Amino acid sequence: MIRILAKGHLQEKRDFTSWRASLFIGFFLALFFLNHCRPSEFLLAPLPSKIDRMEGYASIRITGDEGTVRSKFSFLFQLPHQGRIEVSHTFGRTFYQIIINEEKAALVLPSKKIYWQGEEDEIINKFLGFRLSLDEMIGLLSGKWRERQMGMDCEESREGWSFEKDKEGRITAGQRGDFQFEIREFFKKTSFARQLFFWHPLSRSRLKVLSINFNRPVKKKDLFSLSFLKKYKQKSWAEIEKILADEN
């Protein structure tokens, strides 16, 4: 009986040792794959010498006096004056769209066939919680600010921006008036932001870029056209805001 128990105990010990070894190997493999399968590894490299289009997918969290809002969105920017942002529900259905084409901009609710038309920075303000032009939004994501935005020394802009840079010359933070941003993570060794934080007296936000690509052919030529709005009904911002609140 003692021998049987001893053998059983020995077998249990071997089984436990084998189980512990398997657990260690599994844990090591999990760490390896997690480290090598992060979205940041899927940034196209090397970067094109000239960027005409940038598109990707991101998440944003905005916290203000009324609470916290989280959403995911896709973006497509045709530099320098065209942009399309699609904000999605949790299950992937389009919640609303922002379309910017040169001087014209609209926030569209496709499911309701309604829209609100406003200034470019006015509409981006409703999306992010602070005023930015499309040009500035592209600058924040790419780290490449156009000459008209930046001064000759690239530290102070003509439009009131001030910037901080790291040792590699990448913009890591900036401020204009009471609006501030900080880039806490980049895609690999590029100037393209992966994780940004924003602060404003009325809100604070975190934006995380999940994937980004460049210069992909545009399948639809009318992606930035606003001509389809002729079939939609125009609403005031107060009406749109109420509908968005009810949808959430």
Image: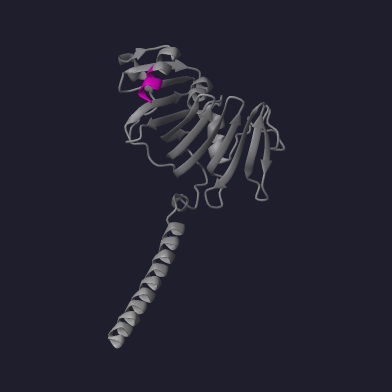
Where is residue 48? Give x, y as percent: 49, 47
What is the magenta range? Answer: 243-248
Where is residue 123? Give x, y as percent: 48, 22
Asked whether the viewer can see residue 60, the reply is yes
78 or 68: which is nearer to us? Answer: 68
28 or 65: which is nearer to us? Answer: 65
Quarter of the rendering containing residue 196: top right
Q: Give the quadrant of the C terminus.
A: top left
Q: Residue furthest front?
A: 1
Q: Give the quadrant of the N terminus.
A: bottom left
In the drawing, does residue 228 fall left or right of residue 76? Answer: left
The stretch drawn in magenta includes residue 146? no
The number of discs equals 0
Quarter of the rendering containing residue 27: bottom left
Q: Residue furthest right?
A: 153
Where is residue 155? Give x, y as percent: 70, 37
Where is residue 42? Give x, y as percent: 43, 51
Asked whether the viewer can see residue 79, the reply is no
Quarter of the rendering containing residue 228: top left
Q: Residue at x 64, y 39 (%)?
A: 173
Q: Main secondary structure of the magenta part?
A: helix
Q: Residue at x 43, y 57 (%)?
A: 34
> What's the image's color scheme?
one colour
The stretch drawn in magenta includes residue 245? yes
Q: Residue at x 56, y 35 (%)?
A: 139
In the drawing, does residue 132 fall left or right of residue 34? Answer: right
Q: In this picture, is 88 found above or below 186?
A: above
